[in-house]
Image (spheres, rainbow, N blue to C red):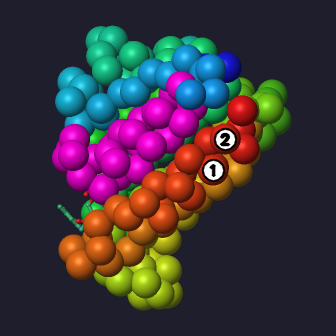
Amino acid sequence: MNVLILNGSPRRHGNVSAMLDAIREEAERNGASVTTVFVPELQVKPCTGCMTCRKTRRCVLPEDGAQQVLSAIDRCDVLVVGAPCYWGNMPGQLKIVFDRIVYGLIGESPRGLPLPLHKGKKAILVSTCTTAFPFNILFGQSRGTINSLRAILKWTGFKVVSAIELGGTRQHPASEKILNRCRKAIKKCM
Ligand SMILES: Cc1cc2nc3c(=O)[nH]c(=O)nc-3n(C[C@H](O)[C@H](O)[C@H](O)COP(=O)(O)O)c2cc1C
């Protein structure tokens, strides 16, 4: 089983990274082959909005980190996306990657309807924020990030099997309890 982890946090030792590390370790313990991509370290140009890829199924820009992510997504059985909440959403670089690879996630029927290209695959979402529970949920902070990621995956065929949110990270950084939830989530996918 191939597990792809997209880490959208620029902090390699932050909360999202700790949660994704727990997922990676548990997946490896269960025999999975795991690839981790540190999205903020990729060279990625923003989408120009030309819409050419919708017809040609390729991007007009020179190949960069976006295509690297897309080929890893093509190979994976389980996709794990970790994103700290930035302004109630995901960090910009992660959004840019998703903008650049629409054509590899969703096809289009002759009648213009979206066609999921990753049917049967599973996804786990992880988000953190400084807003404490329950306001991280009620005020759409980590919940806003999760909802934005769900909106992207909605027509791709990926089934979101777990979404793990941690609020109040300034006072309460990722604890063993939340790391255990992460381990359980990936174990369910094995
Ligand atoms: C640019 C930026 C924007 C942020 N926006 C929010 C926000 O809208 N709501 C919030 O609760 N926390 C916000 N935060 C705080 C982060 O979500 C929080 O520190 C998170 O735990 C960082 O995760 P990490 O430890 O994986 O880097 C923001 C942080 C940064 C750097």
- Estimate the x, y position of residue 158 in percent, counting from the top left: 69, 39
Q: Quadrant of the C terminus?
A: top right
Q: Which mark is drawn over residue 65?
A: none
The answer to which of 93 and 146 lies nearer the viewer is 146
Dots 1, 2 in contact, CB < 8 A:
yes
In the displayed structure, would residue 162 be above or below residue 189?
Answer: below
Residue stretch rendered in magenta on the structure? 4-28
Quarter-of-image position of residue 74: top right
Residue 175 appears in the figure: yes
| Residue lying at 31% horizontally and 21% vertically, measured from the top left | 65
Q: Quadrant of residue 35?
A: top left
Q: Quadrant of ligand 1?
A: bottom left
In the rendered view, tell whether residue 84 sits above or below residue 105: below
- Mark 1 is on which residue type? Lys
Residue nearer the viewer, 45 or 7:
7
Label 1 residue SS: helix
Q: Which residue is mark 1?
A: 184
| Image quarter (top left, top right, bottom left or bottom right) of the N terminus | top right
Image location of residue 71, percent across then percent down: 50, 15
Query: Residue 69: x percent and y percent?
Result: 43, 23
Q: Residue at x 24, y 78 (%)?
A: 171
Name the one closer to the observer, 60 or 182: 182
Placement of 107 over or under 153, stated as above or below:
above
Is 7 part of what is drawn in magenta? yes
Q: Position of residue 151 (x, y in %)?
A: 59, 55
Disc 2 Cβ-to-ligand 1 distance below 8 Å? no
Relative side of 67 to 23, left or right? left
Separation of residues labelled 1 and 2 (CA atoms): 5 Å
82 w.r.t. 69: above or below? below
Q: Which residue is mark 2?
A: 187
Indicate yes or no whether the magenta region holds residue 15: yes
